[in-house]
Image (tube, rainbow, N blue to C red):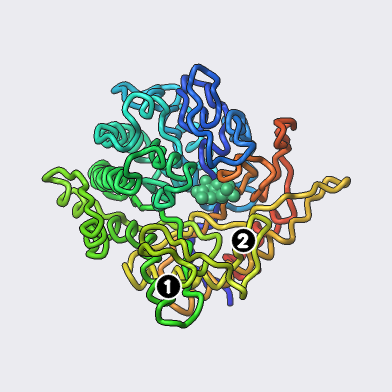
């Protein structure tokens, strides 16, 4: 079973700037929305008070101190044999306020140095342009993504970095988990994706679709621009792919699950096909929503289809019509029920490796475009033994079982898969909890929820395991 994955399969790992870098106010960086999320400090008003779990207080100000320690980290990634590394560029490191025309050279130099360091070891950077962290100024001055002007600011930022790094970075993605804001009832998701607290809007859902339209247009413009800057660039979209199974084979459950899945497909449909699908136009009509669009928008969307689908996969969910409210599943699937056939993590995330093979197949059948698993992983509280060892066998089990299913999708089903980058390869701040103790890494970082810790790095048991997986191109699991 040697070489079941293509020789150029991109094994690696993923993080995001605000969850790993720290240095939140270093090198001329401006505050981003996550830097001030629950605080009233630094002259910025407290923005969200509801819906955010305790602990999301400045954890990202220092995060894993990657900003100062990236050389040491990249050397460790190289030791594991990484062929690629996914991270994001913090927009407010390049444009502290977000709207200026002149970029911050010091911020640009940081990413130059990081990319050079990666390339020194033949590690391909895979870069997300927006991972939950727009410059805070764009929210306080412009109201975030509901303002069409933000499209131009984002395209300008993207143009600067695409040009600057065109010979260093080939693989890009526009918006991380763009479909998370479909979850607008949870302020954290909606806000981090858009800078808008949807629940404070007179018509939250309509506002969310307006924001989304702006982001679709921005993404399409960036894809087109990127190809003009360097035709070799591959610019993908990024979707959180949680499949929603019908709870039973009752036709009502099956239909409900299909409707609920449009909460995912809407995003990949527009990104990959370049137009809005019929089901969403009908939904808007039913609800009397009118989304402001400019005359050229349809053409922009058509001309800016993404090159590949980046996806995160952590879990599956099940939905039951009987459990749902009266609204359509597309307006928030209230019918979510625990699946009795799978176990869940301590955070209730249902562990379902077969679901990964399933989503790879449904996405590939639907678009016949390359896929890239840019997040997958197991968040857990790791215990450091007195000997210093961290025996994270649960993480190895999780990853092994998912890689096995990914392998079937590639070798048995013929899915075109570009690579695999497990989430949080270096321990970093958890997005949904804001805490440090929910860890995903192969590399342990000595940092605790109360802010204590030395930032010292050490290797978990999974470090060596993953090194062997990569060295054997996935045949030794
Ligand atoms: C995804 C995000 C990541 C990441 C991951 C794990 O939704 O793209 O930023 O954090 O989930 O989630 P958490 O950190 O909350 O466990």
| Residue located beneath label 2 in the image | 471
Image coords of residue 421 (percent x, y) = 53, 55
- Where disc 2 sits, the SS reads helix
Along the line of sight, the residue nearer the viewer: 59 or 361? 59
- What's the residue at 40%, 78% (across, down)? 252
Image coords of residue 41 (percent x, y) = 55, 20
Image coords of residue 215 (percent x, y) = 30, 44
Residue with the most extreme top position: 43
Count neighbours of disc 2 (C-alpha within 10 A) and say few if under 14, some if 14 to 19, many if 20 or more. some
Position of 199 relative to 93 (above/below): below
Residue with the most extreme right position: 386
Count neighbours of disc 1 (C-alpha within 10 A) and say few if under 14, some if 14 to 19, many if 20 or more. many
Q: Quadrant of the N terminus?
A: bottom right
Residue with the most extreme left position: 295
Along the line of sight, the residue nearer the viewer: 3 or 463? 463
Q: Quadrant of the C terminus?
A: bottom right
| Residue 85 in sight in this render | no
What's the mark number on residue 83? Answer: none
**Precedes in sequence: disc 2 or disc 1:** 1
Q: From the image, state whether disc 2 or disc 1 is nearer to you.
A: 1
| Residue located beneath label 1 in the image | 361
| Quarter holding residue 445 | top right
Q: Is mark 1 within 8 Å of ligand 1?
A: no
- What's the residue at 60%, 59% (across, down)? 349
- Where disc 1 sits, the SS reads helix
- What's the residue at 46%, 61% (across, down)? 334
Position of 415 relative to 295 (above/below): below
Residue with the most extreme front position: 326
Position of 13 relative to 229 (above/below): below
């Amino acid at each position: 079973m040697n070489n079941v994955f293509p020789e150029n399969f991109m094994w690696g790992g993923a993080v995001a700037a605000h969850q790993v870098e720290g240095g939140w106010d270093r090198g001329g960086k401006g505050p981003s929305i996550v830097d001030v999320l629950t605080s009233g400090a630094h002259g910025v008003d407290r923005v969200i008070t509801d819906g955010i779990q305790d602990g999301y207080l400045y954890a990202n100000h220092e995060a894993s101190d990657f900003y100062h320690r990236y050389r040491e980290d990249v050397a460790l990634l190289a030791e594991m044999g990484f062929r690629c590394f996914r991270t994001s560029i913090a927009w407010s490191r390049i444009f502290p306020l977000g709207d200026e025309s002149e970029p911050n050279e010091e911020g640009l130099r940081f990413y130059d140095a990081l990319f050079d360091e990666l390339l020194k070891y033949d590690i391909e950077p895979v870069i997300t342009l927006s991972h939950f962290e727009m410059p805070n100024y764009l929210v306080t001055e412009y109201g975030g993504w509901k303002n069409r002007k933000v499209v131009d600011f984002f395209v300008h930022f993207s143009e600067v970095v695409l040009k600057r790094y065109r010979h260093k970075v080939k693989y890009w993605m526009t918006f991380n988990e763009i479909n998370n804001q479909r979850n607008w009832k949870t302020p954290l998701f909606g806000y981090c994706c858009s800078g808008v607290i949807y629940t404070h809007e007179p018509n939250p859902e309509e506002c969310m679709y307006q924001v989304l339209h702006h982001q679709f247009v921005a993404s399409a413009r960036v894809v087109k621009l990127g190809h003009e800057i360097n035709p070799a660039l591959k610019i993908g979209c990024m979707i959180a792919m949680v499949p929603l199974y019908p709870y039973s084979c009752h036709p009502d459950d099956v239909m409900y699950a299909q409707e609920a899945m449009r909460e995912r497909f809407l995003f990949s449909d527009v990104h990959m096909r370049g137009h809005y699908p019929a089901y969403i136009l009908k939904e808007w009509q039913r609800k009397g929503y009118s989304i402001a669009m400019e005359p050229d928008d349809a053409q922009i969307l058509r001309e800016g289809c993404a090159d590949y689908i980046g996806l995160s996969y952590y879990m599956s969910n099940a939905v039951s019509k009987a459990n749902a409210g009266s609204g359509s599943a597309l307006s928030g699937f209230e019918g979510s029920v625990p699946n009795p056939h799978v176990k869940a993590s301590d955070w209730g995330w249902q562990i379902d490796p077969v679901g990964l093979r399933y989503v790879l197949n449904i996405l590939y059948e639907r678009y016949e475009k390359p896929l890239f698993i840019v997040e997958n992983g197991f968040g857990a509280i790791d215990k450091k033994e007195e000997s210093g060892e961290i025996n994270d066998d649960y993480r190895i089990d999780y990853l092994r079982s998912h890689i096995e299913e990914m392998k079937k999708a590639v070798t048995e089903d013929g899915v075109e898969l570009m690579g695999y980058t497990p989430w949080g390869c270096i321990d970093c701040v958890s997005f949904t909890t804001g805490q440090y103790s929910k860890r995903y890494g192969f590399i342990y970082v000595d940092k605790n929820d109360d802010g204590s810790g030395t930032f010292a790095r050490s290797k978990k048991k999974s470090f060596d395991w993953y090194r062997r997986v990569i060295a054997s191109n996935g045949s030794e699991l």
